[in-house]
Amino acid sequence: MRNELTIEDNYYITLQPICDSGMRHIADEVLYRPSKTLVFSKIDNHLIATTRVVNTAFLENSLKKLVGNRKLFFNAPKEWILKPELLPPYPNQIVIKVLKNLISEPEVITALKEIHNLGYNIAFDGFILNDATRPLLNIASIIKIDVFEPIVEENIAEYKQHGIRLLAKKVDNLATFNHFKSIGFDMFKGCFYTHPEIYTENSTYHKNNNIHIRIISELQLEEPSFELLEKLITQDSQLSFMLLNYVNSLILDSKNEINTIYQALKTLDLDKTCNIVTTIILANNSPASRILLPKALTRAYMCQNLAEKTRDLDSRSGFILGLVSMMDLLMNIDLVELIEELPLTLEIKEALTLGKGNLGELLNLVIAFEEAKVDSRSPELISRLNDTWLASQKLSNEVINTVVY
């Protein structure tokens, strides 16, 4: 049965990562927005649509499957705050984000106290500390602050006295990350982890890049040599350990434990080997890689799923296309240089560099969906993309939790 949510409501859902001071991916913020072409006649319709989207993400698909054990920040509309029974039933994992325009209303404050007593974490976004708002510090778990707004150090100290964690948003570079980390911020949201200086500071993480590229290159061949792969993989002790650990986790009988890389490779089919080994490599290239990896894998699985259902395209090419499109960021290598190193088909190369061909159209569509720029597309296609994203996000999270953590 087709999901009712995505048939009649043009909505996009995406997750934005939040990391801690050690660049560990500890939370996500769920963003959901209506299509610009969708016009609601009543606010009630808007709320119903929002409810369907969030219930699909939280209830029908299971929060754990989407984000594992990470916290999830959720922007609750006023109508939901006033009726806490509408909130997703995960008080230990959900963070209720409240915008500053709501905290001046007495009924909202009363409802927030009830929500706090139910065990939910509350995050105030754009919070301004004054005599009127100071009592709210007793129910706040997190305060979200725009790095471009003036910072009052006395306020920071007062927040800390209440045990409140501070989240810096719009952190666009490493210098900003380090500054806000130094003044006591605990969490960070922004694109700072995509910059090359992150890898410069953590150069030990990608010292095996040449070996890793050779491994990934061999895995792209129709008939890769497991003997060569074993020689390459054993040069990276962490990769070897994690691969053996993963394969043995699939085996119920401890008497048949896998002890060599060659055995591990033969246990998995080719596609599984390619996906798992590549995931382990990318996840451990730097702290920033683990933040980017969920998006990269979700994109890869989206391309794989859509390619599988498209004439003249195959799923493996789709997966490789989606993953390589972000591999330059994950490995801090120029994309053109990376493409030259990997034995990719001409069709994949042209899709990545020129956006040409059926694969190019596929990649452009997935990226446009990620950026919520598919308003001109049909509701049926947006429905399909939403469903594919949800399935891909779950699969990505499952692989990362199994292989990496």
Image: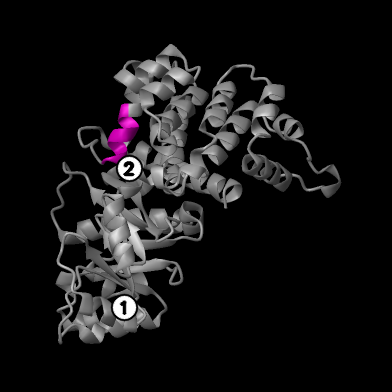
Residue at left offset 35%, top offset 75%: 141
**Image: 347 above or below 123:** above
Asked if the stretch drawn in magenta spans residue 368, the answer is: yes
Q: How many callouts does the rendering have?
A: 2
Residue at left offset 40%, top offset 53%: 56
Which range is magenta?
Answer: 364-371
Asked if the stretch drawn in magenta spans residue 265, the answer is: no
**How are the colours assigned in the image?**
one colour
Which residue does the numbered mark 1 point to in the structure image? Answer: 140
Q: Is residue 156 left or right of residue 321?
A: left
Crowding near the residue tagged with mark 2, few <14, some 14–19, many ≥20 C-alpha atoms within 10 Å: some
Q: Nearer the viewer, residue 255 or 55?
A: 255
Q: Is residue 402 left or right of residue 2?
A: right
Which residue does the numbered mark 2 point to in the structure image? Answer: 195
The image quadrant that residue 294 belongs to is: top left
Q: Position of residue 95 (x, y in %)?
A: 36, 68
User: Which disc number belongs to residue 194?
Assistant: none
**Image: 174 above or below 150:** above
Q: Earlier in the sequence, mark 1 or mark 2?
A: 1
